[in-house]
Image (cartoon, rainbow, N blue to C red):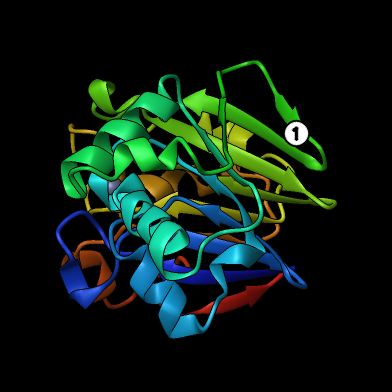
């Protein structure tokens, strides 16, 4: 299985990096984990056929994590009319959030999405969501509550990808990462902050609590991207990890 980093930037475009999105691929089958505003551009850059993406999973309703869906959908409606169904999985209210965002960004287009074969699923903490070969477990994250933030664990074809979403420290990160093949953890800042994000110094202290084959940092401000003497793994846009 392969993970392609379409975007590992923070909400402010630090380091010239793209908004959050990870493409998980096995052969020609693909899943998107988060779909920040720049995602369609990065998919085009990588030469990915949107039709090969069966599923979009969203961690929370902030633009740098789901603001790319309207671009994905207009391409799938008008540029290359989509033939296959598309699953969109997210926190409670995901169908309405996507509809409203579509209309806000491309006025007049939301009603047309109702003619598409979009299949919405909501996940909830402590209720594993099983759809065919895919299992999603989610835990509430500690981030802006109106965005309904979650940490998301994706089990697919025998592999486990754990993703913190945006969050400050929560003990939920421990079961999230347990026995994962890859754990992607946000690290927006160097030092601990009190507003919904993690800091490097804090993650260094807690690192031994995570049981994962490999841990990678994402959602980094300049101070994290450029820090020297850094002992955790930092992702870069365009990176491909086989796992
Ligand atoms: Zn974010």
Q: Nearer the viewer, residue 228 or 105?
A: 105
Residue at 28%, 58% in the rendered image: 37
In which quarter of the view is residue 114 placed?
Answer: top left
Q: Which residue is mark 1?
A: 131
In which quarter of the view is residue 94 placed?
Answer: top left
Above or below — where is 133 with respect to 223? above
Above or below — where is 139 with respect to 116? above
Residue 114 in view of the camera:
yes
The location of residue 195, given as percent across then percent down, is 18, 33
Secondary structure at numbered mark 1? strand
Position of 20 with respect to 192 (left or right) is: right
In which quarter of the view is residue 221 placed?
Answer: bottom left
Tag count in the figure?
Answer: 1
Residue at 56%, 18% in the rendered image: 125
Q: Quadrant of the C terminus?
A: bottom right
The location of residue 76, given as percent across then percent down, is 47, 60
Residue at 21%, 49% in the rendered image: 106
Position of 75 with respect to 225 (left or right) is: right
Residue 218 in view of the camera:
no
The location of residue 19, given as percent across then percent down, is 30, 61
Above or below — where is 177 with respect to 53? above
Position of 122 with respect to 140 (left or right) is: right
The location of residue 151, given as percent across then percent down, is 49, 35
Q: Nearer the viewer, residue 101 or 67?
A: 101
- Label 1 crowd (10 A; few <14 / some 14-19 / many >=20): few
Residue at 66%, 16% in the rendered image: 127
């Amino acid at each position: 299985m392969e993970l392609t980093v379409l975007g590992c930037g923070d909400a402010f475009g630090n380091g010239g990096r793209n908004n959050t999105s990870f493409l998980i691929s096995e052969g020609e089958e693909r899943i998107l984990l988060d779909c920040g505003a720049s995602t369609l551009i990065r998919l085009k850059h990588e030469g990915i056929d949107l039709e090969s993406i069966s599923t979009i999973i969203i961690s929370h309703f902030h633009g740098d994590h789901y603001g790319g869906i309207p671009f994905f959908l207009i391409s799938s409606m008008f540029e290359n009319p989509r033939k296959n169904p598309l699953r969109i999985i997210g926190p409670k209210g995901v169908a309405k959030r996507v509809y409203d965002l579509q209309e806000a960004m491309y006025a007049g287009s939301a009603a047309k999405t109702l003619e598409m074969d979009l299949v919405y699923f909501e996940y909830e903490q402590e209720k594993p969501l099983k759809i065919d070969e895919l299992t999603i477990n989610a835990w509430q994250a500690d981030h802006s509550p109106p965005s309904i933030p979650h940490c998301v664990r994706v089990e697919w074809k025998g592999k486990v990808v754990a993703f913190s979403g945006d969050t400050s420290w929560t003990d939920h990160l421990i079961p999230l990462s347990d026995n994962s093949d890859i754990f992607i953890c946000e690290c927006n800042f160097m030092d601990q902050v009190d507003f919904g994000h993690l800091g490097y110094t804090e993650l260094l202290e807690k690192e031994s609590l995570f049981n994962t084959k490999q841990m990678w940092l994402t959602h980094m401000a300049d101070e994290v991207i450029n820090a020297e003497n850094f002992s955790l793994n930092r992702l870069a846009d365009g990176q491909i990890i086989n796992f």
